[in-house]
Image (spheres, grey):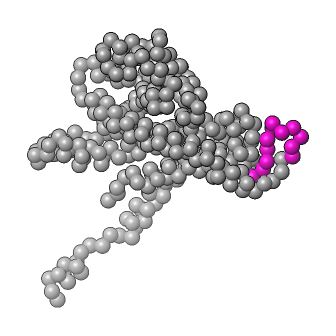
């Protein structure tokens, strides 16, 4: 018998009881996880199940409160056909996707830089960490109103600052132009949401062991190599959480648009959520509005599923 065969024959095999024990512990941990999240899931279902079901029912019926005496008749997929064939809906979808992509990309980059700065040791770090959360703690309606006032061309701080520094953009009616309106919305949205992403990423940075970076320095890795090959991969779980929350917030944006631009000038800043609000509460077309709501929920779930799949942590 060859030495390789003897070695293979003598190699100890894992005992069945050990395997069963590991499987039992994993199953117990899984059951414990389900039990811990069950109250939250039940609470969310209690709050959202009826509105979702009601919107789903509306989406297959003709329900328009502006038409007196109209019967709530079953129309099948007519509301969805109307939605997909509407140039207004398609344009709102394009603006929503563009806003989501640009805002999430810019805010993620800024938040990551801010998190890396706050992760360093320096005097007053605790105070600065607390101060960073102030914009996020301010209600969106208040912050949007504040930025709307600041972008006022006559009395706003932005116009005063740009004029004194000599930068372009002074004496500009920001909320009257298409691109300038979007620029103002991006600034207000970033001011509000970057701190939220930065704190999540900071929490992810703090759980990375210092020994990892010590080993990288001993091996001669540069700061950029350490960031690209260790920080980013190890930060993937926190980054996934931040991106999921922020992307869904951006995709469903309404309040900052409603306060700052009202969807204008014209309909140039009208997003899907704003169109849904107009259809429901202004046009009182609950059937068509229900179809838009169902589609918003479906697309939001699809976005979350893609993030979970792409940013899933690697397991050995």
Q: Is residue 51 magenta?
A: no
Q: Is residue 220 visible?
A: yes
| Position above or below: 111 against 14 | above
- Residue 123 in picture, x, y percent from top left: 24, 19
Q: In this view, does 6 lie to the left or right of 206?
A: left
Q: Which residue is drawn at the image coordinates 83% and 47% (left, top)?
A: 72
The prevailing secondary structure element of the residues shown in magenta is: loop
| Position above or below: 235 against 187 | below
Q: Can residue 255 be seen in this view?
A: no
- Residue 155 in picture, x, y percent from top left: 47, 10
- The front one of 180 and 57 is 180
- Residue 185 in picture, x, y percent from top left: 48, 29
Residue sticking out furthest to the right: 69
Q: Which residue is drawn at the image coordinates 62% and 43% (left, top)?
A: 88
Tell me where residue 118 sits by quadrant: top left
Tell me where residue 66 sits by quadrant: top right
Q: What stretch is highlighted in magenta?
A: 60-71
Q: Is residue 125 left or right of residue 247?
A: left
Q: Which residue is drawn at the image coordinates 79% and 48% (left, top)?
A: 62
Total number of numbered discs in the rendering:
0
- The front one of 195 and 27 is 195
| Position above or below: 165 against 38 | above
Q: In this view, does 177 lie to the left or right of 201?
A: right
Q: Which residue is drawn at the image coordinates 52% and 45% (left, top)?
A: 94
Q: Quadrant of the N terminus?
A: bottom left
Q: In which quarter of the image is the C terminus?
A: bottom left
- Residue 281 in picture, x, y percent from top left: 71, 33
Q: Is residue 70 magenta?
A: yes
- The front one of 161 and 12 is 161
């Amino acid at each position: 018998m060859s030495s390789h065969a003897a070695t293979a024959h003598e190699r100890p095999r894992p005992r069945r009881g050990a395997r069963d024990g590991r499987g039992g512990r994993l199953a117990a941990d899984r059951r414990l996880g389900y039990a811990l999240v069950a109250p939250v899931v039940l609470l969310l279902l209690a709050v959202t199940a009826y509105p979702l079901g009601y919107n789903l029912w509306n989406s297959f019926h003709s329900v328009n409160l502006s038409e007196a005496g109209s019967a709530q008749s079953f129309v099948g997929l007519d509301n969805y056909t109307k939605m997909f064939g509407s140039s207004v809906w398609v344009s709102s979808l394009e603006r929503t996707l563009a806003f989501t992509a640009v805002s999430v990309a810019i805010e993620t980059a800024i938040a990551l830089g801010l998190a890396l700065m706050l992760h360093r040791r320096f005097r007053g770090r605790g105070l600065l960490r607390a101060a960073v959360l102030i914009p996020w703690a301010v209600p969106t309606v208040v912050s949007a109103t504040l930025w709307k006032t600041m972008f006022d061309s006559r009395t706003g701080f932005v116009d005063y600052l740009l004029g004194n520094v000599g930068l372009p953009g002074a004496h500009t009616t920001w909320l009257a132009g298409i691109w300038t309106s979007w620029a103002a919305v991006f600034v207000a949205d970033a001011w509000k949401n970057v701190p939220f992403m930065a704190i999540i990423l900071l929490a992810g940075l703090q759980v990375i062991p210092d020994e990892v970076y010590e080993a990288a320095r001993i091996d001669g890795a540069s700061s950029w190599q350490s960031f690209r090959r260790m920080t980013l991969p190890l930060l993937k779980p926190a980054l996934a959480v931040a991106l999921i929350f922020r992307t869904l917030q951006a995709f469903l944006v309404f309040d900052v648009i409603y306060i700052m631009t009202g969807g204008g000038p014209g309909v140039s800043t009208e997003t899907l959520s704003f169109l849904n609000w107009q259809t429901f509460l202004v046009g009182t077309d609950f059937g068509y509005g229900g179809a838009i709501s169902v589609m918003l929920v479906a697309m939001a779930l699809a976005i979350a599923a893609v993030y979970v799949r792409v940013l899933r942590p690697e397991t050995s």
